[in-house]
Amino acid sequence: MQAKTAKSSLFPYLLWIAFFVIAPIALVVYYSLLDIHGHFTFSNYQAFFSSVYLKMTLSSFWYALLITFFTLLISYPTAYFLTKTKNKQLWLLLIIIPSWINLLLKTYAFIGIFGLYGPINAFIEIIGFDPQQMLFTDASFIFVSVYIFIPFMILPIFNSLDRLNPTLIDASRDLGASSFTTFRRVVLPLTMDGIKSGIQVVFIPALSLFMITRLIAGNRVITLGTAIEQQFLVTQNWGMGSTIAVFLILFMVIIMLITGQKDKGGRVR
């Protein structure tokens, strides 16, 4: 009886997965096998392996890697110091609150900040220099992307650090380990699950960015996300856009498998 009840309780979840996960992916795969006229073809997959799309894929991975690296570089020490503060939950909330604001609104805010008549260029003029074009550059694109992804990186790392058993750090110091050795041999390995989770939630979305790419970087940065948008909305080639989406899904699955978590000891339970 209990087994039957358990199986029936799974039915809504299986139905959800079938309609909102499997069916959309199957539809994307189906459209990827059609040309612009709706005829069955493998030409879209052949086109993806051309130099244009391979270069675009490498560019997407490069920008996603840079965004993830700088986000991790800022987020880990921030999360570490948050765990040492008195009101750590309050500070964590203040960091997370900006992620509640609509992404489009934040992007337009940065357009105003980095614009020729924005506050940064106004300050540059005050100190005697000519205004600089900060928009539509690689640096502005990476900066805005890192800012947007920081809360999503901090949260899993903070949770890993906060659950770390402090007696292990004390034992390491009692055994004569330096602060750096303690961090390298104790803290970092035991918080690796948080780092992997943070990498997942930053690297995977960074691969498919298109709105920030368009508004902040202009046409200087072309990623898989902007390529999908262009194929669907500009050229109306749904087959090629779906093909790019299929490979993007494959890349995401591979990244999730690589950064899969393995639970370690050393945490307060």
Image (cartoon, rainbow, N blue to C red):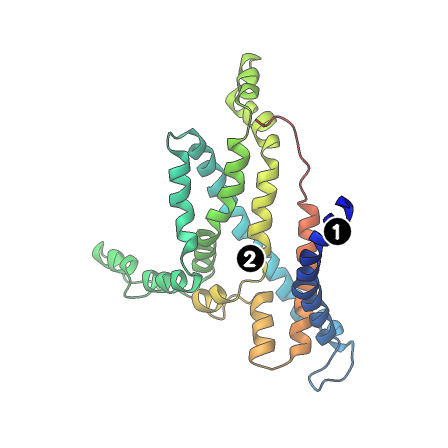
Q: Quadrant of the C terminus?
A: top right
Please tell me in which quadrant of the rendered image residue 45 appears: bottom right
Element type at marker 2? helix
Residue at numbered disc 2: 206
**Residue closer to the observer: 60 or 102:** 102
Of the residues shown, which amino acid type is indicated by label 2? Ala
56 and 183: which one is in front?
183
Q: Under tag 1, what secondary structure?
A: helix
| 143 vs 220: above or below | above
Q: Which mark is residue 159?
A: none
Visible residue check, residue 50: no
Cβ atoms at labels 1 and 2 below 8 Å apart: no
Of all residues, the one furthest to the bottom in this rendering is: 37
Question: At label 1, which amino acid type do we have?
Answer: Lys
Residue visible at 64% across and 63% down in the picture: 57
The image quarter in which residue 250 lies: bottom right
Cα–Cα gap, marks 1 and 2: 37 Å
Where's residue 200, x and y in %? 60, 49
Query: Is residue 214 among the parts visible in the rendering?
Result: yes
Query: Callout 2: few (<14), some (14-19), or many (20+) C-alpha neighbours within 10 Å?
Result: many
Lateral position of residue 243 relative to residue 96, left or right: right
Which x, y percent locates residue 50? 71, 71
What number of labels is visible?
Answer: 2
Q: How crowded is the residue under tag 1: few (<14 C-alpha within 10 Å), some, or many (20+)?
A: few
The x, y position of residue 254, in whole percent, is 70, 53
Return the residue nearer the eye: 70 or 229: 229
Name the N-terminal-most of marks 1 and 2.
1
Q: Which residue is mark 1?
A: 7
Please report the residue visible at 28 percent of the width from the left and 60 percent of the height from the top: 121
Q: Is residue 220 above or below residue 98?
A: below
Q: Residue at x 60, y 61 (%)?
A: 59
Question: Which residue appears at 66% of the width and 56% of the height?
Answer: 252
